[in-house]
Amino acid sequence: MQNMKTMKNTPNRVQSTLLAMAMLLGLPVKAADGPPDLIKGETTGVNPKQTYNLGSTGMRGWIYLKPVTYFDGVQSRTTEVSRQILVTHVGAKSPADGVMQVNDVILGIDGKMFTDDARRSIALAIQEAEKETHKGILKLTRWRAGKTDVAQLKLCVMGTYSATAPYHCPKSKKIFAEACKALENEPLSENWTGAITGLALLAADNPDYLPKIKEFAHRMGSPTLDVSKKTMDAWENGYRNLFLTEYFLRTGDQEVMHAIRAITLATAKGQGMYGTFGHGFADRTADGKLHGSIPPYGPVNQAGLVANLAIVMGKKCGVTDAEIDLAIERGSKFFAYYVDKGTIPYGEHEPYAFHDNNGKSAMAAVYYAMQGNRPKEARFFAKMATAGYKNRECGHTGQGFSYLWGALGANIGGPAAGSAFFKQACAHLDLERRCDGSFIYDGGEQFGPGSTEDDTYYGKSSYAGLSPTASYVLTYSMALKNLCITGKDAVPANALTQQDVAAAMTSGRFDLDRLQMTPVQLVAAFSDWSPVVRGWAAEELAKRPEAKTMEPDLLKLAEGKDAHVAQGACETLGYMKSNAALPVFVRLLSHQDRWLRYKAAQAIKLVNDVAKPVLPDILLATAKTAAPLQPIDWADPIQIAQGQLAVALFDGPLAQSVKTSDPKLVHPAIRAIANNPDGMARWHLRGYFENNLSLEDVQALAPDLLAAVKTMSPADRMFSNEIRMGAFKALAKYHYQENIEAGVMFAKTQGGHGSQGRTGEILHELVGYGTAARSAIPALKELITTFNEQCKRDEFPAGELNNQRTAAVEDAIKSITAATTQPELRSIKK
């Protein structure tokens, strides 16, 4: 393998050379529509810094990326219309060195043109070339400076993936060995990314690595480790403890047990009331107890899943404490809500309608599997991860965690599931593998392309410092089963049957298969194991002209005994905007199946103002189905169905009809949503509060509005300030005096995220109280101090953003001081 990393060509020349060529020849520099034709000199959209690794060829190249829809992007159809690859760099001493050049355009394989996705086509061609039968010969159809010919590269022969790869597969074994060799040269940083590299080395089961791993484990798990440091957040605790616990279970080294105990207990104590985590840990409750809400903008399940996993792994190592057991119970109950509903979302949100979302289904599968007694959840998420092979290349801020966890989550379902997932992913893996045996990270926000630090083939590239080689070593190490997370001591009850695996594969491609199905087949898909498939089937059926004639049957199915079928039928009727289904939707809002409630609420949101005839019933159901914040109802911990009703009633065309409805129905519904645990559900009241509440409404709701201003939602605080602002403005509009103190409290407790703009908005309303607001001046001066102290604690950036906040307060103080009048005040007490 080659490891020379000197630069062969300068990628900055690429675009300028093409542009110069185009102008010289009088060719267009803009593609008419779709991808630019590079051989005609079209360069619109070409960015030589946003490229893809071209496997073991030694090249990086620009490939046209534009999914038809966002949905296509999530389903990995990002480069589907590409038919050309622009070479942007050639690595020294690589197979392409001396054969290919920067600005060459790859048009196809072996003299033929690409007729499909150029990126996938070259990946498959590389796989073919690396087989023994082709002796490493890869023939590329190349365009260079006006001429088309065939260029021949000599790749290393790697063999053919076996039917059970990465299990019992010589090619996988060879790739794994070379990747481990490359990993040896990577640093073991004393942080969460280093922990993953440590896990990969540990998974290799190479005795030569043990001294290095031991020394690293002793650094990461030092007896003097201070878990109270700010850097010991959910990410750090999660991955650090995952490494230390796997190391302990592998070696029995007691030297790290002190750190494992400390991290496990600190993480358990830092968990939020719903079993979630943010980047950091939960605030305390109003009465000073542990396990409050997650600041500053709510949970981040990507961090929370590994933090919860770290707690489970700590217990697996023998750490005991009541806090640990309670944390495992909370986390398990929260994420179990998503079983049979969808994949794990960003935070305390509704399920996402995909099989995986940046590896979170996979992480959930590992989380439940490590507990040893949650087969229902482990199997569901393993099956979701297996079916999520098309979602691998999509993720918020990038796909690093998808590449780390995807195969491991599928593998929880057993070798058959892991192998089925791997078969779908292996072409991408071979595209990411370089000729020196290392792997590269290509990815960006959602489904973006990649880059390296210096835009070269051998340049460094990672997701937030996470080694791509380490991620893929863990994938290939599944065959060894050396770690708990890679299959060691797997619980048989978690394994998927061959039928389960086949069903997962079919479900993964249903998004396209449904287009060829008959209406009868789509109705049959309502019984599919996958909630994602059931939703896709409903969406497709509603588009068919036959759906209208099927309406009577769908109405019966929506209230039938099979909950899955009822969900699909209800969703279809919602997409159809069925008038006849309105009474059905209303009845289903109180159904014992919480997900069917959600589908009914979602359907009402979809039909929108068509629901006017049953609006009184919807308002009644909204109030009737509200649950108290405590104790948490784990069947629907954040009352997601009501969130859909909040949108339908107060944040769309139906809101105008709500405005003229009987206040005796409207006000209880408002109170129900205003007290929903979910900040996003409450958010949908903001516009209604600001624009639709009459004086009579505010008088009746004033105590509720004041409580809304003063109190953050316990869940999903990302959107919690929206209802606070709406309620604050409604009270300010009619000059309620209690709103002055509440406004200062709002400004002080709003959190840092977005506060640079929100502070001025709050204070603008306070200034409107004129001289009546002078009583708040001392508190406003304290507010400036509070803001500055937040910066000293690194809770908010000092400088321009904080200056916006403090300047807004200072200006408000000046305006209030200079005021000579005040409006007539109202009081809630009167």
Image (tube, grey):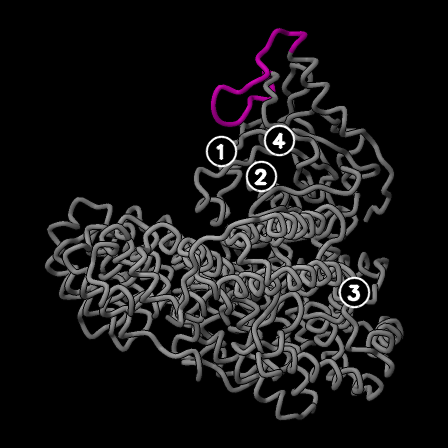
The verdict on residue 548 being magenta is no
* Whether residue 499 is visible: no
> What is the span of residues highlighted in magenta in the rendered image?
23-40
Question: On the image, numbered disc 1 is attached to which residue?
Answer: 81
Disc 2 marks a residue whose amino acid type is Arg
Q: Which residue is mark 2?
A: 119
In terms of secondary structure, where does tag 1 sit? loop
Taken as a whole, is the magenta stretch helix, strand or loop?
loop
Question: Mark 2 vs mark 1: which is more N-terminal?
Answer: 1
- Residue type indicated by callout 1: Val
Q: Image check: 266 left or right of 186?
A: left
Does dot 2 land on a helix, a strand or a loop?
helix
| Quarter of image, res 282 | bottom right
What amino acid is at disc 3? Gly
| Mark closer to the chain start, 4 or 2 | 4
On residue 194, which mark appears? Answer: 3
- Sequence-first tag of 4 and 3: 4
Residues tagged 3 and 2 counted as in contact (Cβ below 8 A):
no
Q: Are marks 4 and 3 in contact (CB under 8 Å)?
A: no
The answer to whether residue 629 is left or right of residue 211 is left
Q: Residue 226, position in %: x, y?
A: 82, 78
Q: Which mark is on residue 190?
A: none
- Categorize mark 3 by other alpha carbons within 10 Å: few (<14), some (14-19), many (20+): many
Question: Badge 1, how many Cα within 10 Å: few under 14, some, many 20+?
Answer: many
The image's mark for residue 85 is: 4
State how far apart marks 2 and 1 are (Cα). 10 Å
Q: Are marks 4 and 2 in contact (CB under 8 Å)?
A: yes
Q: Nearer the viewer, mark 4 or mark 3?
A: 3
Q: Is residue 111 visible?
A: yes
* Farthest-out residue, front: 820
Spatial CA distance of label 4 from label 2 is: 8 Å
290 vs 430, nearest the viewer: 290
